[in-house]
Amino acid sequence: MRDGVRGLLARRFDSEALRAAAGTPGLDRALWRELGAAGFFALRLPEADGGVGLGLPEAVLAFEEAGRVLLPGPLVASHLAAGEVAGAAAGETVVAAVDGGLVEWLAEADIVRGDAEGARPLRSVDPLTPLHRVPADTTGGAAAGPADPVAVLLTAAEQLGTAGRTCELAVQHARTREQFGQPIGAFQAVKHLCAQMLVRTEVARAAVYAAAVTAGPADIAAARLLADEAAVRGARDCLQVHGGMGFTWESEVHLHLKRAWVRAQRTGGATESEELLAADLVA
Amino acid sequence: MDLSYAPEEEEFRARLRQWLAKVLPFLPPKPSPGDWPARRAYDLGWQRMLYDAGYAGLHWPADAGGRGATPTQHLIFLEETEKAGAPYVGANFVGLLHAGPTIAAEGSAGQRTRWLPPILRGEEVWCQGFSEPDAGSDLAALRTRACRDGDDYVVSGSKIWTSHAEVADWCELLVRTDPGAPRHRGITWLAMPMDAPGITVRPLRTLAGSAEFAEVFLDEVRVPVANRVGEENDGWRVTMVTLSFERGTAFVGEVVACRRVLGELARAAQQNGQWDDPVLRRRLGRLNAEFRALWRLTQWNVSEAEAGGGVPGVGGSVFKLGYSHARQELYDTAADVLGPDSLDLGRPWMLERLSSLSYTIAAGTSQIQRNIVAERILGLPKGR
Ligand SMILES: Cc1cc2nc3c(=O)[nH]c(=O)nc-3n(C[C@H](O)[C@H](O)[C@H](O)COP(=O)(O)OP(=O)(O)OC[C@H]3O[C@@H](n4cnc5c(N)ncnc54)[C@H](O)[C@@H]3O)c2cc1C
């Protein structure tokens, strides 16, 4: 399953395609249907309903792969809509959703779930995620109720993908870029940044994979907090390790950081998860 | 990730719980931290109870006198004993977690029968004489010299930070046997009896006020050649076996304990009103996430060890880095819950707050662990 998704993404959305997409944003409908055909959206639907009949652990692996390559589009919203919105499972219908006062990919979607009344476009920080802001008094914030735990976990899986990928990118660069006559990865200041990236990634991985097995709300909230941190800090440290190159549009590093920021705003943000975990301590 | 337990494992857990419920109420009172002879007696007494009940050396191989339990059963053992509030390994730490496993892996048949059973029965205490004043992180710089004289090595030099030295019967000692060889190839592993003539132990007070470790001065101490584990000058390799045990499994019970403390902290915060402060509350929530993840990572490492068998690997460094910093954050948060009372060492958690400061230093500092992760897992080059 994981290899299937990884293979499809390697073929259809490699680093070059990512950079090209950043220049000409827009949803690749053909790719979306291919994802549908590969079972990305129907993964957790029962086979009787035309789905793949797998569970959260497999979905988490698929979303981790999507996160690694920064696959654009309302992936979580469309996945959650499979079986509920006609055509979503097959990748024929692109479904977006209102979440935390924001809507990703509103204009490109066929269907928007939630109340997007009065939504206005933002100058999105992430070139690969068009954003609309919904007025706070309609669906934004607490009024929307607690976040869907599956959405929280799948977002965490995407963040985990970014955490792993940015660690790899940093290590690759640290091994090849030379200064003062040696690879910069031989300098301890750089080495230790990389080591901490791996520590955060592996701790987050344990949390995300375990939450996929238990599906418990506290486990999912924990996964989310650790994966957000591993992704956002990982992308920042990756940028630092790349030096001036990291500050360019040309390198893909900024795309990882910007997407990690976008995902961190989803499903109530960190606050909701922290409060849930605090309440869990005295339950 | 497989988080489920087999029926035999659940049965093992149930029997262990029953036994703990039966014996723990009859434990003698805990000795005071400053009374080392009493601490030794208490820790050995507990080990003897484990031995009699068939729980000693659970994870040791059967041919070393252990029970050959699976890593998962060992994990269950550490989890349940901690949850039940059973004593910690204490003075048995080096014997059970470093010296014993090293002897089991590298010792001769005769050495195994001489040293392993007394460790399991709670009769002999071991300490670890590795660090020296000029060889800490750079352990291979150690200079304590051992010269062959007939059937003995004659050992002179000094060790430092030796935990439990005052009450130990044996010391796993690293000595230099070939000063001419490259540093890593001139080191030998010896078991030194602590009552041998020429040994002086000078206790050192830690910042927590008690004497947890000591300086050990060695003046022409005679150690039989028969006490050498592994070949002469092969001690570095033998040592690496020990250190990987230390970093792999030593903290399981503590993670369980930290999760309990976290719950206690939250309730204390509710009682003293700090819970109304969202910043503090959210910090506690974040710690909950952290320790849940560390517990999962432990379970995962254990099931990997079970699948792969053998010695816990460098993954222990990843865990130790995450854990030692989370533990310090936990006790710093405890101090914030207590506010001004955090300055009172009579308050709960405040002594642990002090001892948590050693976690980023002992058993390889955080900086050294990061070097290990970067060089051995990520493959970054060594610096010049
Ligand atoms: C509570 C406690 C119990 C202990 N028990 C024992 C015991 O029973 N037996 C035993 O043998 N030892 C024991 N130790 C010793 C422990 O293993 C050493 O303290 C530890 O390895 C560090 O060595 P050091 O104290 O000489 O510090 P140093 O090695 O001098 O380190 C000082 C600082 O320099 C940094 N540093 C050193 N080298 C590097 C490098 N290459 N790159 C980056 N930074 C570096 C370190 O991270 C640290 O911050 C114990 C220590 C403590 C605190």
Image (spheres, coloured by chain):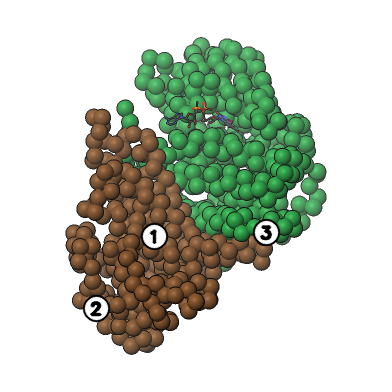
Chain colours: A brown, B green
Which one is nearer the viewer's eye here, B230 or B178?
B178
Q: Please report the residue visible at 72 percent of the width from the left and 44 percent of the height from the top.
A: B340
Q: The numbered mark 3 sits on a residue in which chain?
A: B
Question: In the visual, does B7 lie left or right of B265?
Answer: left
Q: Are marks 1 and 3 on the same chain?
A: no
Front of the two marks 3 and 2: 3
Q: Which residue is identified by label 2?
A: A33
Q: Is residue B136 above or below residue B337?
A: above
Q: Residues within 10 Å of mark 3 (few under 14, many from 20)?
A: many
Q: Amino acid at mark 2?
A: Arg
Tell me residue B82's x, y (percent): 66, 52
Which of the two discs, 2 and 1, labels the residue nearer the N terminus?
2
Q: Please give the name of the residue rendered at 39% of the width and 42% of the height, measured from the top-left corner.
A: A193
Residue at the image position 45 percent from the left and 55 percent from the top: A229
Q: Residues within 10 Å of mark 2 (few under 14, many from 20)?
A: many
Relative placement, left or right, of A101 versus B64 is left
Q: For mark 1, what is the residue?
A: A261
Would you call the spot at circle 1 few (<14 residues within 10 Å), some (14-19), or many (20 or more)? Answer: some
Whether pointer 2 and pointer 1 mark residues with C-beta atoms closer than 8 Å, the reply is no
Q: Which mark is residue B275?
A: 3
Chain hosting mark 1: A
- Amino acid type at image mark 3: Trp
The image position of residue B266, as x and y in percent, is: 67, 57
Residues at circles 1 and 3 in contact by the CB criterion of under 8 Å: no
Q: Give the answer, above or below, for where B44 lies relative to A144.
A: above
Q: Relative to B150, is B306 above or below? A: below
Tell me the element at label 1. helix
Toward the viewer: A147 or B47? A147
Chain under numbered label 2: A
Within 8 Å: ligand 1 and the Cβ of disc 1? no
Between the residue at mark 1 and the residue at mark 3, the CA separation in whole angstroms equals 29 Å
Instruction: Indicate the position of residue B256 as horizontal and vertical percent values.
Output: 61, 53
